[in-house]
Image: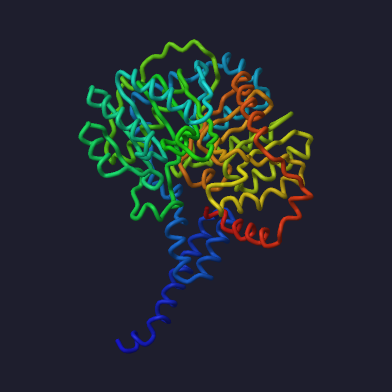
Amino acid sequence: MDYVRNHIWQILILLNYIIALSAVVTILLKKVNPTKALSYIIGLLALPFIGLIVYYLFGQEYRKTKIFSRKNVLNQSVVKKIQEKLELDHKTIDKVDDLLDQKSKLIPLLYNNEKSKLTINNDVKLIKNGDEKFKLLFKDIKEAKHHIHLEYFVIKDDKIGSELLNLLCEKSIDGLEIRISIDDVGSSISSKMKRQIKEAGIEMNSFMPVLFGKFTGQMNYRDHRKIVVIDGKIGYVGGINISDNYVNANNTRYWRDTHIRVVGETVKQLQILFFTTWDFVSKGQTEISNAYFPEHNCVENVPLQLAASGPDTDWSNIMEAIFVAITNAEDHIYITTPYFIPNGEIVTALQVASRSNITVKIIIPKKSDSWIAEYATNSYLQLLLEAGVEVYQYTKGFIHAKTMVVDGVFSTIGTTNMDYRSFNINFEVNALVYNKKISSELTQFFNDDLKDCCQLHLESWQNRAKRTKLIEALARLMAPLL
């Protein structure tokens, strides 16, 4: 015992490196992204104890261990029948192919990856900013008759959040089924409000609860989705969470965001997606009935496909869809993202597109809500500017929209940032819209946002301070961990 006490630090260091080396072997055998693997290996070997903690919190690859399973939901007869009904005949698919030309490659990609079906009968409304979203959402909730399902990364019981939660309590007391899935790290609801929610009969569960949530803002793996399904007929998806930050009437900093409201066949897919998460967070055998999939009377014909990805999918579905859309562009690509920390595939695709005389424009915030993400983002911009990509920094406030328009016929709106975390770690969902009208409206959103941007130029960007470049380089090294 005296020997142990006298050599405690040497023993602890030895144990640290035994565990660290076993972790290194595990990382190598997993064949993960080389940059990400190298980041973890350097951390494990160069930072005793700290490296192990970081790897334990952020380095576990749950996609491979399959702790997230969707089989209980997808194997249910009701869900199988719904998915079969969503199958399109070849004549309809050919019509879409003619409209989209090369963009139609996305349709079989997502189907082959995750059996994500293209649906035709949809009415899609683009929503600009939280003020407009909450006005529409509250109206739909007030008119709901059977059930309301919410799945959000952020729900706070601040002014707008309390208004929403109080309304849901009223609807639950009136007899509606209310289910709420919140991310345990992103959301913040007081004990008092939780008691009120429970007493009203609302079922609410947290996604992957963690200890000390305020100190684990980047804890893997998070449910970053923002989904609402009302009566199985109306769906919402996009970038806007439930918080006063998203309401410009209540917020000191202007918050620019984009969401969509959908009526039609795609709502059934959103419903299935919600139930896959609910089955996990409720830790029970969720029984699904036809009541959650009513027939719709939508007569609009907006082709739409849902792309969902996360540790429960075998492939990085959304990243792959974005990659295919970029590589098949023929005229222009307009991207808006709050965080631009891409993998090598996306960087190369954008560089090649721009050098092939395709107009590539990207809007990012000038001032991010995360200093390290801002520096990491800036570390990638010179590569784009050298290839002729037009980069614009949004100056009016914080731009949180996650959208892309390609050639005026394809657009995507969703929860996915252009970063490692969204592509590989978090649960995300995007709506892929194959429609000229929606693409035109989203292009107008983009052009309006350009009026509140300053364009970066290669020469002046190269001349920024060496200290700034060094911080960016260090932040970029941490990019796989952000």
- Name the quadrant containing residue 446: top right
Question: Left or right: where does residue 390 sit relative to residue 109?
Answer: right
164 and 472: which is toward the camera: 164
Question: In the picture, which quadrant includes the N terminus?
Answer: bottom left
Residue 190, horizontal then vertical, whole percent: 30, 44
* Vertical side of 108 occupied by 312: above or below: below
335 and 424: which is toward the camera: 335
* Vertical side of 372 occupied by 70: above or below: above
Question: Left or right: where does residue 121 sit relative to residue 157?
Answer: right
Residue 339, horizontal then vertical, whole percent: 57, 44
* Vertical side of 97 occupied by 203: above or below: below
- Name the quadrant containing residue 311: top left
Q: Residue furthest left?
A: 199
Residue 10 appearing in the image: yes
Residue depicted at 53% across the width and 60% down the height: 28
- Name the quadrant containing residue 6: bottom left
Residue depicted at 34% across the width and 39% down the height: 157
Residue 107, horizontal then vertical, whole percent: 57, 27
Residue 449, horizontal then vertical, whole percent: 63, 32
Residue depicted at 58% across the width and 13% down the height: 91
Residue depicted at 57% across the width and 25% down the height: 433
**How many numbered markers are drawn?**
0
Residue 83 appearing in the image: no
249 and 84: which is toward the camera: 249
Q: Residue furthest bottom?
A: 2
